[in-house]
Image (tube, rainbow, N blue to C red):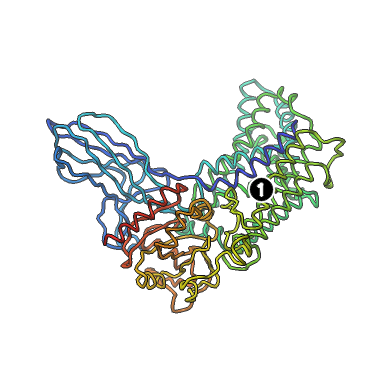
Amino acid sequence: MNFVKSILLTIIVAFSSLATFAQVVEPVAWKSSVEKIADGEYRVTFKASIDEGWHIYDLGPYELGGPMATAFTFEPAADYELVGGIEADGKLVRHYDDVYEMEIGYYEGDVTFSQIVKSAGATITATVDYMACNDSNCITGDSEFSVKIGEAKETATVAEAAESTGGGSIWGFILSAVGWALVALLTPCVFPMIPMTVSFFLKGSGSVAQGRFRALMYGLFIVVLYTLPIGVIIFLTWLIGGDAVTADIFNWLSTHWLPNILFFIVFMVFAASFFGAFEIVLPEKLVNDSDSKADKGGLAGIFFMALTLVLVSFSCTGPIIGSALIQSTSGEVWTPIITMFAFSVVFALPFTLFALFPSWLKQLPKSGGWLNSVKVVLGFVELALGLKFLSVADQTYHWGLLDREVYLAIWIAIFFLLGLYLLGKLKFKHDSDMPYLSVTRLVLAIASFAFVAYMLPGMWGAPLRALSGYMPPMQTQDFVMGAGSSVAAPTTDVAKSGVKYGDVLELPHGLEGFFDLDEAKAYAEKVDKPLFLDFTGHGCVNCREMEARVWSDPRVLDILRNEYVIVALYADDKLKVAEEDWVTTDSGKVLKTLGKINSYYALKTYGVNAQPYYVLIDREGNTMADRSYDLDVDGFISFLQSGVETYKSK
């Protein structure tokens, strides 16, 4: 039964981690209220509660090229009159910004905007448009308020903001870390340490209160030993280089070939270790020294007992910690720290509880072959997850090593072998004999084979929407049944004209367009159509989600194909462009790669540096509408239609 629970938990965590990137971020919550200040005169208040690490810009105004100021629009009506302008009350930070080349101001924490109104009784409709930014992302948002004069009650509304990066909701990362921590507890490096913990605390003398204090300190030390090192590294980087350097490091980690190949190799090495090829352990002297110091009394002994646990469990927890941290390195300073904290708290909790209540130890199952089975299943999971890093490097550098069907073929083989292992048809070095096959183990094997059956149609071009954010893009597939020999066979003048960078980049679903904005603008003027700007990235999970779940809708494809000139601007592509296309930033830095040029353009023009981000512009480059990550197909269609209507009305 314990084997069943552990294997089931492993599989659930493995697949749930694939979905942690599709969460929605809403960093600003708005509330409105009204207060009577005199006869016929009221103060309407709009309070913004801004998440830690985020800020919104002040009321401005700013010249063209500046940030997006927070702006309130009141719907005109005859039954009320605005007195003066909107006023703000909050923590205002002002500084000269090198990117915008001007002094800007922004608010953090809570900020209140107020407007004096004269009325005998009216319903005031107002809208706020704003831009919320953190160290790596900027998103635009708006909220609508309906305030009834004479009713001094508070109305809450949440900003209509959406995530625009591959990073994901902090709660998604936390849940993933919690799942990995539970898996780690069931590994053979960790599970046997629980009785050792109980034995250590049973040897201690003193009152019940002292015993509880020692147990709680033990749990605290485990959390500190896991969380503090990563926190120190991140904050030292931030203190030395500031927000920009920290964001650059995270961007480098997520897109550069070197860290991605390194992560891929690490995952493969740990998978081999989990299969029993060799044992990964820290130096014996380091572990022994820590263990010997654990015999000391007081807090020092408890600390070294916790350190011994961390060191001994390293060979099993190392890749699990890596999985949790790597998922969270999306440019956020706090996200990896919070992720590691969540992991360590859940990991430390059982040790703390068993130290507090040693009698619970009798209810634990005995160590045995089931622990090694958990480790082997983790090995299969490590093989599958490790491929993502190789895929990111392959996509950003156009190596052509891991196209979609190759990626799928490897995953199919991995989970087919996992099914055979669960059936007992495969046996690894440290596995125990399995005299019979339990029903529950058979059910888990069926689940693994069912997943293989789900993936098989993908070899012939099935979209596999449940995995769309994790697989290489569809346009990398060489063959799609019913679509000829290529996913995007050129059929129009756009494709035949020799699109710039078209030899290494393609649009999904057979769509045709451009990868250079100037070229796209020239063509748009020729055919008299608006432009659809797609700020995307090879390593952007949410971009793949949007393309697979939203763009694939026939109504969306029809509008994109017939009403717009599409230009995809990749923010992480490593292609070095011709010298005449190099861009010099305001600070004098010369940008030579396509990704850096596109990323700089997005930040300079629209104040965003995250993907996906969609902008509809006319021939003159004026913005008609914009949109971030949102899987609402009908909303996306309305977004596209609004651009067409605006363009035709001019």
Frontmost residue, 366 versus 29: 29
Answer yes or no: is residue 189 visible: no
| Extreme residue toward the left, this view | 39
Question: In front: 33, or 543?
Answer: 543
| Label 1 crowd bin: few (<14), some (14–19), many (20+), radius 10 Å | some
Which residue was labeled with disc 1? Answer: 454
Amino acid carrying mark 1 in the image: Tyr
State left or right for residue 621 relative to residue 579.
Answer: left
Q: Where residue 605 sits: x, y (%)?
A: 36, 62
Image quadrant where residue 408 sits: bottom right
In this picture, residue 86 sits left or right of residue 162: left
Considering the image in quadrants, where does the N terminus appear? top right
Mark 1 residue element? helix
Image quarter in which the C terminus is found: bottom left
Q: Residue furthest top?
A: 207
| Residue in view at x 17 percent, y 38 percent | 117
- 172 lies above or below 456: above
450 or 536: nearer the eye? 450
Question: Percent position (x, y) of residue 88?
Answer: 25, 44
Q: Say which residue appears at 36% left-offset and 73% top-offset.
A: 526
Q: Residue furthest front?
A: 482
Residue at the spot x=46%, y=64% of the render? 568
369 over 545 or under it: above or below = above
When asked about the image quadrant of residue 260, the answer is: bottom right
**Residue 112 in picture, x, y percent from top left:** 28, 40
Residue 481 visible from this viewpoint: yes
